[in-house]
Amino acid sequence: PAEQLLDQNDFWQHQSDGLAVFLKPGFMKMWRLPCDFSELVVVGQRFHVKPLSRVMTDDYQWYILATSPNRVRLMHASMQGVDEMKPDNFPENLRDALNIDEYVSTLQFHSTSGKGPGSRGQDAVHHGQGGNDPDVTKQDEILQYFHRLDKALCDYLEEQRHPLIFAGVEYLFPIFKNACKYRNIMDQAVTGNPDDCSPAQLWESSKELMEPKIRARAQAAVAKFQEKAHTDWASADPIMIYDAAKMGQVATLIVTPGTEKWVVLDKDGTAKFVKQNGAEAEDLVNWLAVETLLNGGSVVSSPIDTESGIAAIFRTPAGQYVHETANR
């Protein structure tokens, strides 16, 4: 099935920065991903997801919702770039959302100097009845508009948990937050009139909000490990982490990028280290990432100062599951 893609010009013309393809007999899944990967082919007993671990963290990817009464756009972003999405169920604007046949907007914008999402550092000022405080009728219309937009957004994103950044005129943000039921909307917004901003301009502004959050998450995971490193709640021992992962007890796995640990897994589940990759070998770090994610844990891609290049924080003290494993 993968070979058949070679001649599909339309497929290759609609790519992102990275492509992940997973195959087994009778099964093929593909993901276009907004980050670069080194070219890699792996054949093994399980899918090789380790290169995706940084992408699968909730805050490495995010969405940008750029909206005004005149226009709605949704973008999928990462630290590498941004892709504009085309949801079929989104209203095009306030008139479309409220089915207004003739909507004459009193919400007019002009640019003035200030910090906005555009590269020229411009912000937008609202003009109409009440200046920056629109009348009650307009507020009600905008609230209804945002309720319709939020319903379409939640239907489209379904169970996604990536952060959502609102991009719009400042006074609209609290109205949207009041209407929004998406579980992970950011408390900060890209403020200013987004209508004339390109996806690249909005991405640059959103990245300024996300970079501290991403760094803080990795730093918090490393700090928590260091705090618990000499207790039964954490370990840098690959075998101990392996035993914990088998029991679903790894809450957070921290992996130094590029770390590989080749093992052969016996039928009884014993992991035997080998010096290099081979027909029966697999990357233990990948195995740990898969098991951690399957059991609801998180994988953090960050340099960690341990001999093994990996570390784990456990859900329960190590002695409990080691004893249970020994009993079994």
Image (tube, rainbow, N blue to C red):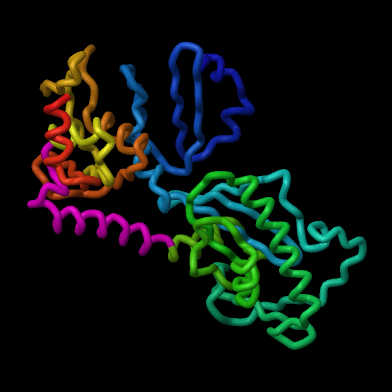
- Horizontal side of residue 157 vs 129, given as left or right: left
Let me know if residue 174 is in the magenta part: no
Q: Quadrant of the C terminus?
A: top left
Residue 290 x, y percent position in the rendering: 33, 32
Q: Decide whether the magenta segment is chiefly helix, strand or loop.
A: helix
Q: 2 and 53: which one is in front?
A: 53
Q: Residue furthest bottom?
A: 130
* Magenta part of the chain: 210-237
The answer to whether 248 is drawn above or below residue 57 in the figure is above
- Horizontal side of residue 215 vs 3, given as left or right: left
Please say whether residue 192 is visible from this viewpoint.
Answer: no
Residue 96 x, y percent position in the rendering: 82, 57
Q: 324 and 240: which one is in front?
A: 324
Q: Quadrant of residue 261?
A: top left
Residue 292 x, y percent position in the rendering: 30, 37
Q: 145 and 95: which one is in front?
A: 145
Q: Residue at x 92, y 65 (%)?
A: 102
State the count of labels.
Answer: 0
The answer to whether 98 is drawn above or below residue 281 in the figure is below
Please say whether residue 317 is visible from this viewpoint.
Answer: yes
Q: Residue at x 59, y 35 (%)?
A: 14
Residue 249 x, y percent position in the rendering: 25, 40
Q: Residue furthest right?
A: 102
Q: Residue at x 11, y 38 (%)?
A: 237
Q: 288 and 18: which one is in front?
A: 288
The answer to whether 60 is drawn above or below residue 219 in the figure is above
- Horizontal side of residue 207 vs 269, given as left or right: right
Q: Residue at x 81, y 77 (%)?
A: 137
